[in-house]
Amino acid sequence: MSDTSPVIVWIRRDLRLSDHAALTAAADSGRPVIPVFVLDEVVDRLGAAAKFRFGLGVEAFGDALEGIGSRLILRRGKALECLQALVKETGAGAVYWQRAYDPDSKDRDTKVKAALKDDGLDVQSFAGHLLFEPWTVETKTGGFYKVYTPFWNAVKGTDIDAPQTAVSDLKAPSDWPDSDTLDDWQMDAAMRRGAAIVGKHVSVGEEAARGRLGAFIANGIEGYGDGRNMVAEDGCSRMSEPLTYGEISPRICWHAGMRAREEGKAGAETWLKELVWREFAYHLLHHTPHIVSDNWREEWRSFPWNEDERKSEVIAWKRGRTGVAFVDAAMREMYVTGTMHNRARMIVASYLTKHLMCHWRIGQAWFEDCLIDWDPASNALGWQWTAGSGPDATPYFRVFNPDTQAEKFDPKGQYRKAWIAEGQSNPPETATDYFAAVPESWSLDTGRDYPDPVVTLDEGRKRALDAYENRDF
C-alpha cells in the first residue's frame, strides 16, 4: 500500500468514534480514510424494528463523522462487490473492519477477506464488539464453557484494556466517491405506521449512549440488584440498545461498572455479570453456532412443541391478547417501544414455550422482527435458556406463573396499567399507542373488551408438565 492510497473502513455494528480499533488504526496510518456502510445481504435480512433502528444509528454516525470533517459513504448490494467497486473507484490499498460473530456475518466476512487479499489488498479485522474474543476463554481442559457461572469466574479478574480515545480527525481523500442516500433505502419501510410510535422511544447515537450510561452509573446502579426486576420501575441500565449497534463499546461500559464497584455501589457487580452474560452468549454462538437455529441440546429435537404459527394461541400471544395481563403488557410494551423489560422477556418466553407449548423459534423470530435491541446471540440464548433446550438452562420443568410473577414484580399493577388500555376509563398514552402502532389489518381499537385467557394458567402448566413427564429423552 502506498503512502497516499486510502484506507476503507467498513462500518458495521460499531457506530461510534470512541474505542473503535479499526477507525483508530486507519487514522494512525496517516493515509486518507473512507468510512463506508454497506446495506448488504446480512443487514437486508434484519427484522423490521432492527433495520429501522440501524438506519437511525447510521444516520447519527454519519453526522458524527461530518462533525470531524469526514463523511460516511453509503452503498447497497453484496458486501464484496460494493467493497471491490470502492477500491477500484478510490485506489484504496486497504480495507479494515471490526469483527462480527454470528454465523451469517462470519461466513460473509471470511469470503470477503479471502477475495480482497487475493486482489492484493491489506485486509485487517479488529476486535471491538466484545470484551473477550470468544475463542480466548477456555476451560482448564482447553474446551469452551457451557455453564455461565464458571465462565464468569474465569473472566471476572481479567485486566481489560482501557478504551481507546475518540478519533477526532480523519484525513480526507482528494475526491470522495459517490454515495447512496439513506432516505432512498427506506430502512423503516417494514415498520409502517409503527415507526412513528417506536421512534418516540429510541435513544440514538454515541452521545446519547454515553449520557444514558452516565445517568445509570450516577443514579441507578446502586439499586440495580433489586431494581432490575421491578418491571414498573426504571431500574435497568437500558444499555442493550446502544451496545447492539456499537454506539458504545463494552469496554467503556465495563470500566464504568468497575469504577462503580470500587466506589462501593451495591449493584455494580450484578451489572458487570450482565455484561458478561452477553459475552457468554457470544462465546456459545462462536463454539456452537446452531444455537440460533436448532435446539442446543440434541435430545430436545423430538420434543412435541407446536410449530404452527397460524394457531389462534400464537396469534393471541403475538398481539398481546392472551388474556394474561402480565404477558400482554410485555408484548405491548415491545410493540410500542421496540424493547421489553428483561424480567418480562423471561415471562413471555416461558408462557409461549410452556403454557402454550409452542416452539421457541416462533418467539425468537417474533422478537427478531419487533426488538430495536435485537442481538443474535442474546436472543437465541435467552429463548433456549427459558425453553429448557439450551445451555445452562433454567430447569426445563420450571413453569413461571405470570400472575405470581406480577404479584412479586409489579405489586401495584403499574406496569400492566401502563400498557393495557382495556378496562381503564382514562388509559395512558403508552397503552393507547399500542393501537396506533399495530397493523391496521389486526382491526384492534381501545373499544374492544379485554380477552379471556386463551388457556388457563393451571391448564397450561399441567399440559407442559405432562409433556415433560412423557418426554422420550
Image (spheres, rainbow, N blue to C red):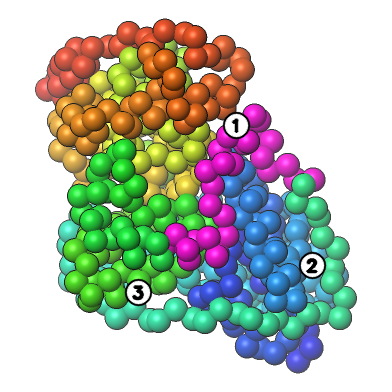
Q: Label 1: few (<14), some or many (≥20) within 10 Å? A: many
Q: Label 2: few (<14), some or many (≥20) within 10 Å? A: some
Q: Which residues are magenta?
A: 184-213
Q: CA distance from mark 3 to mark 1?
A: 36 Å
In the image, what residue type sits under mark 3?
His
Question: Which labelled disc corresponds to residue 255?
Answer: 3
Q: Label 3: few (<14), some or many (≥20) within 10 Å? A: some
Do the residues bearing badges 1 and 2 touch, measured as CB atoms within 8 Å? no
Magenta span: chief secondary structure: helix
**Residue 218, percent across and down?**
34, 65
Q: CA distance from mark 1 to mark 2?
A: 35 Å
* Residue found at x 45% / y 27%: 428
**Residue 145, percent across and down?**
24, 60
- Give the residue at mark 2: 86
Of residue 142 and residue 97, the one placed in the foreground of this image is: 97
Pick whichever of labels 3 and 1 is earlier in the sequence.
1
* Residue found at x 23% / y 71%: 261
Pick whichever of labels 3 and 2 is earlier in the sequence.
2
**Residue 420, percent across and down?**
40, 22
- Give the residue at mark 1: 194
Of residue 41 and residue 314, the one placed in the foreground of this image is: 314
Instruction: Left or right? Give the position of 216 relative to 170.
Output: left
Q: Secondary structure at mark 2?
A: helix
In the image, what residue type sits under mark 2?
Leu
Q: Residue furthest front?
A: 426
Q: Residue furthest left?
A: 469
**Residue 169, percent across and down?**
68, 82
Pick whichever of labels 1 and 2 is earlier in the sequence.
2
